[in-house]
Image (tube, rainbow, N blue to C red):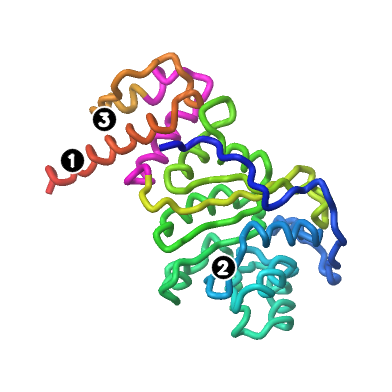
Amino acid sequence: MNYGRAPMLSCGLSNKSGAAQSNQGHRARKRFGQNFLVDEFVIDQIVQCVSPAPEDRLVEIGPGLGALTNAILNRTSSLTAIELDRDLVSMLRRAHPPERLNLIQADVLKADWPAILSADDRRIRVVGNLPYNISSPLLVMLIAYRGRILDQHFMLQREVVDRIVAGPGSNSGRLGLLLQAFYRCEKVLDVPPEAFDPAPKVHSAVVRMQTREQAAVADPKGLSEMLHVGFSQRRKMIRRTVLPWLAARQIVTGEVDETLRPEQVPADVWYEWANKLALKTELTKKEVN
């Protein structure tokens, strides 16, 4: 199975700008990491990438001023949105009836995701323009709910997206290897800073993450722990980091070049080690019981 970089899709190109939407008098708050998407051309491109259908069950994270919210509601019957800013929640509630827009005022990392997911039998589709400071914790947290998620489209810092979709090489990392074990990850759109108000100092990109019907790894926790060991000292060869760690747990790693650095190890090899670790952990639990 190929877990490497997928080609950029043709659902959108960002070298064109459209009309800017109004910020409706709301001043972006730094403590919430707010950068509002205002470029109508980019908004349209994102909706094309998501391609929402009337019967889809969608959850938007961080609707902000509602630019993407409005565009999605033009193509689907209803939408659930999670927003932390009380002022924005009040504004959005005035703009849309509750049967069309179900608003949850909460920190997305502390929201009641089991309740959100169990409200309907359908698997959800998640979209969002994520504040950069919570993107990695949120992506990791949502792995636990992947069985109820069909796909995810997130606006992130472009550097983060490039790492998520990277194959073996200098740009691959812990987050990308972790997510690729459970999702097919594709970069679908580049977005320039001027598409936002206020404009961030970095470029952004949209990543599509489609949940794999059969994950490459059985245990996310074990994989995450192993990748942390391997990448916490990424300049060191694996013979000094993850290989001794695995040996201490009686995991046979097979034939591997011990002089490789962690980003040079193929995804399939990491996943093979993770599955051996999960099996060993399960056997150890059975012996104890």
Residue 274: image location, x then y, percent: 34, 36
Horizontal placement of 207 versus 266: left or right? right
Q: Disc 3 designates what residue?
A: 249
Quick one: label 3, few (<14), some, or many (20+) residues within 10 Å?
few
Pinpoint residue 253: horizontal percent, then vertical percent.
30, 24
Q: Is residue 201 left or right of residue 164?
A: right
Label located before the other in sequence (1 or 3): 3
* Label 1 – label 3 distance at C-alpha: 11 Å
- Write down the residue under mark 1: 284
- The boundaries of the magenta stretch are 216-242
Assess disc 1: are there few (<14), some (14-19) or many (≥20) residues with their C-alpha within 10 Å of its C-alpha. Answer: few
* The image quarter in which residue 91 lies: bottom right
Q: Is residue 144 left or right of residue 233?
A: left
* Closer to us: 200 or 8: 8
Sequence-first disc among 1 and 2: 2
Residue 154 falls in image quadrant? bottom right
Q: Which mark is nearer the camera, 3 or 2?
A: 2
Q: Amino acid at mark 1?
A: Thr
- How many marks the image carries: the answer is 3
Label 2, secondary structure: give it: strand
Labelled pair 1, 3 in contact (Cβ < 8 Å): no
Secondary structure of the residue carrying tag 3 is: loop
Could you tell me which secondary element the residue under label 1 belongs to?
Answer: helix
Q: Amino acid at mark 2?
A: Val
Residue in view at x 56 percent, y 40 percent: 6
- Residue 264 screen position, x and y as percent: 49, 23
Query: What label sits on residue 59 in the rendered view?
Result: 2
**Quadrant where the N terminus lies?**
top left
Residue for point 47% across, 48% down: 183
Tag 3: amino acid: Arg
C-alpha separation, residue under disc 1 versus residue under disc 2: 39 Å
Quick check: is 259 in the magenta stretch? no
